[in-house]
Amino acid sequence: MKNKNLIGQLKVLLDADRYYQESNLHEELFDSILKSNENINIFYINSNKATNCTYFFDEKAVIVWDFQFWDFYQEYLYQAESCIINGFNLKQGISAVSAKYISKKYAKIPTLSHFIYQIYTEFNIPVILNEEKKNKIDRIIFLGKVFSFFHEMGHIEYRKKRNELIKSYQEIILKFYSKLPDSFASLYEGWEDLAKSAKRKIANGEADEVLEEMVCDMFAAGETVAYTQHFFNNDLAGLISDVIIAHDKLISFQALFNAINEAWNNHYAEIKYGITVRTYNIEDRINYLAFDREIIGYALPRLIAKFYDLDIQQIKIIEQNKVKEHIDLDECIECMTQNQFISAAIKESRL
């Protein structure tokens, strides 16, 4: 925390946005990266919103690092991997962990929080993982944290409009989308029209917010590889493979996380003021972001390979590893965002 006045301004904004506590924990790697940069601060918290983001104050910026998000992500990833390895019900396991998050999100509304937590306690599946597997998952979480940090740094560089690497990433993405055939939509069974619409919006310059997110993903992937090479003894191709996997697992989780928040936030008035529960649809903006970040995920191995001396065989192995490690959360998202489920939970919690 280098600028007390800036942090004071930030706290005013955070007070209006979420319930939070400043954390005494720090991420030493990020502190060391920012040590000599007077224009960028990082502020560590725990909050009910569990969201990392960046606030801008003219030429200065503050990255808000929410440890609650990473606690939830670790619990989610341990549960997901345990279910997959042991043949447990993935939908049940992830839905239970998601219910625990929703319970914490509404901690200031005890009746709803308690009711949702009961869902967690009833359906939670004990995690069974050996130390070797936990270490592998922890490595992926570490790379995910580094990726997320540089993703926020990407937003800062993007806003400056002076970073040549950011500009080149933007050009690469726009060129990639201009050549992307509509047949790619077949990857998203049942969502083909929305996937094609997402592609058109990027290609036509109608989705600047989503384009920025994709540029920041590319920037973060490259920077993560560059900054973590000295942490691991494996070959460069192996590290790139793990970074790609870390990106895929993180954006899959964020798609779940964003959909849950969007669905439940739609019912804010009913939850807070006890009015009649209504039906809502998740905004296409949320789905566009999920589609486009996943599409960039498919392209990342070959895009990153442009900056490193990888042969086609190495690239194919990285792509195969990504497919093998991918976690399909469609059923979990549908379960936890259904209006019927949310409405029933709100109503039941009032009894």
Image (tube, rainbow, N blue to C red):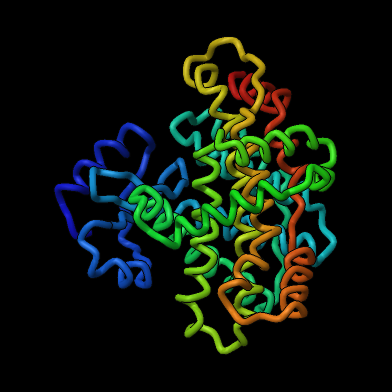
The residue most toward the bottom is 233
| Residue at the image position 31 percent from the left and 54 percent from the top | 43
- Of residues 221 and 129, the one nearer the viewer is 221
Instruction: Give above or below for 225 relative to 108.
Output: below
Q: Position of residue 56 (x, y in %)?
A: 30, 44
Instruction: Give above or below for 281 relative to 70.
Output: above
The residue most toward the left is 5
- Of residues 60 and 65, the one nearer the viewer is 60
Q: Position of residue 122 (x, y in %)?
A: 71, 44
Please give the count of numbered marks on the rendered protein.
0
Q: Position of residue 243 (x, y in %)?
A: 60, 69
Res. 253 in view: no
Question: Which quadrant is the N terminus positioned in?
Answer: bottom left
| Residue at the image position 72 percent from the left and 63 percent from the top | 81
Q: Quadrant of residue 114?
A: top right
| Residue at the image position 57 percent from the left and 38 percent from the top | 102
| Residue at the image position 37 percent from the left and 67 percent from the top | 27
Q: Is residue 12 left or right of residue 101?
A: left
- Of residues 260 and 163, the one nearer the viewer is 163
The residue most toward the top is 276
Question: Which quadrant is the C terminus positioned in?
Answer: top right
Q: Is residue 167 left or right of residue 327?
A: left
Res. 216 in view: yes
